[in-house]
Image (cartoon, grey):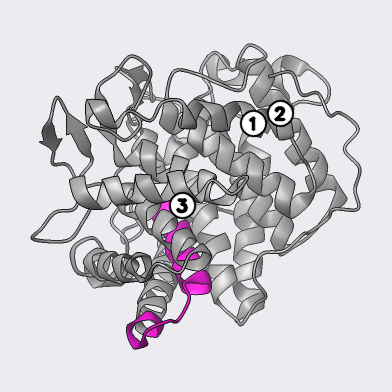
Amino acid sequence: MDQLWANRAASAEAAITKRHLRKLWGLPGTQLGVVAWPAEGKHSRFGTWHYWWQAHLLDCLVDAQVRDPQPERIQRIQRQIRGQRLRNNLRWTNDYYDDMAWLALALERAGRLTGVERPKALATLADQFLNSWVPEDGGGIPWRKQDQFFNAPANGPAGIFLARYDDRLRRAQQMADWIDETLIDPDTHLVFDGIKGGSLVRAQYTYCQGVVLGLETELAARTADEHHGQRVGRLVRAVRDHMAPDGVLKGAGGGDGGLFHGVTARYLALVATTLPENEPADAETRTIARDLVLASARSAWEYRQTVDGLPLFGAFWDRNAEVPTAAGKDAEFVEGAVNASEIPERDLSVQLSGWMLMEAAHTLSDEREPEGPAGTDVPDPAQEEEA
């Protein structure tokens, strides 16, 4: 069973590599993911590139290196990091705290698990989250700079990063407590999106649940506070009951939404492998989380298409994937978010979620050691670290 999911994860990686990975502007030693397949010229020239999608591409490359350490993939990880910084005008930061949190998480994992380290980048990004904490304004940290929208998609991943980075557990706990006090639906126990001007934004997205699961699981594993494990159990059951018809995580289409259920699968897998079993209910929580990931992965694989021998995943894991064409409207950035292509399977985000899901299933399909260093014997020839 373990090799089955390893093979499926490898196939998903091969599909992304073939269809999406390209040099940035033809520059040697660089790489980014083309955001659409089939691609138009503007995509291949990286006129559009979507910062946070690239961060998840990096995170998937780290997953793959942990699964199957290869010197060639270390080079892809290095190129991806270099490409992201170059395309971002030689900076690590942008105006969106959620975007920066995703990159920080991927960079931290790349350093810890593959040896491709960017300590100055991590310090720069950590400062962004630490300095944007504004409880006097109702937060939390905001969604973006000069904004009064405080939401789970910013505070969740930033909190996970701070829990893992440089022992910033106190702030991570404050962020988790803010979410629990402010954004939990008393009826379903799901996580609301955020608050704006003191009013709840009541949308409930799968990835909001995922990032809160990740944050609370990290804190359950790193502190003696029993509330964190209890919150994980409550939320895992809420996801099962309200966001996983027939046990399969709900999709949210393409564009940014293409990543939502992939993020949820990643952190459900973290629950299944990492949540301490301090109470009898914790073992059941881990089992529920595992079952949700594996049922979603089986369904996504069953409903995939195969193009040139490689998988193409659907935007919804419980229905047939549609093979995209270059015709029709493609994804575009509007008011701080990327909407979906006419055929959502065209979007890199959708395919990254499928890959992320296969990697998550692989971590759960057999008893495995916790995440540890992989491929760290490969030197990094380019440690450019301008912040």
Query: Residue shown at 73%/26% (left/top)?
Result: 82
Q: Are marks 1 and 3 in contact (CB under 8 Å)?
A: no
214 to 198, vertically: above or below: below
Frontmost residue, 10 versus 235: 235
94 to 188, vertically: above or below: above
Camera-side mark, 1 or 3: 1
**Residue topped by disc 1:** 123
**Residue topped by disc 2:** 120
Could you tell me which quadrant the N terminus lies in? bottom right
| Secondary structure at numbered mark 3 | loop
First reached walking from the N terminus: tag 2 or tag 3:
2
| Secondary structure at numbered mark 1 | helix
Could you tell me which quadrant the C terminus lies in? top right
Query: Hey, what amino acid is under mark 2?
Result: Lys
Query: Hey, what amino acid is under mark 3?
Result: Phe
First reached walking from the N terminus: tag 1 or tag 3:
1
What range of the chain is rendered magenta?
263-283
Alpha-carbon span between mark 2 and mark 1? 5 Å
**Residue topped by disc 3:** 313
- Picture coordinates of residue 217, whole percent (x, y): 44, 63
Tell me if I can see residue 268 in this picture. yes
- Picture coordinates of residue 200, whole percent (x, y): 12, 37
Q: Are marks 2 and 1 in contact (CB under 8 Å)?
A: yes
Query: Residue shown at 73%/45% (left/top)?
Result: 111
Alpha-carbon span between mark 2 and mark 3? 36 Å
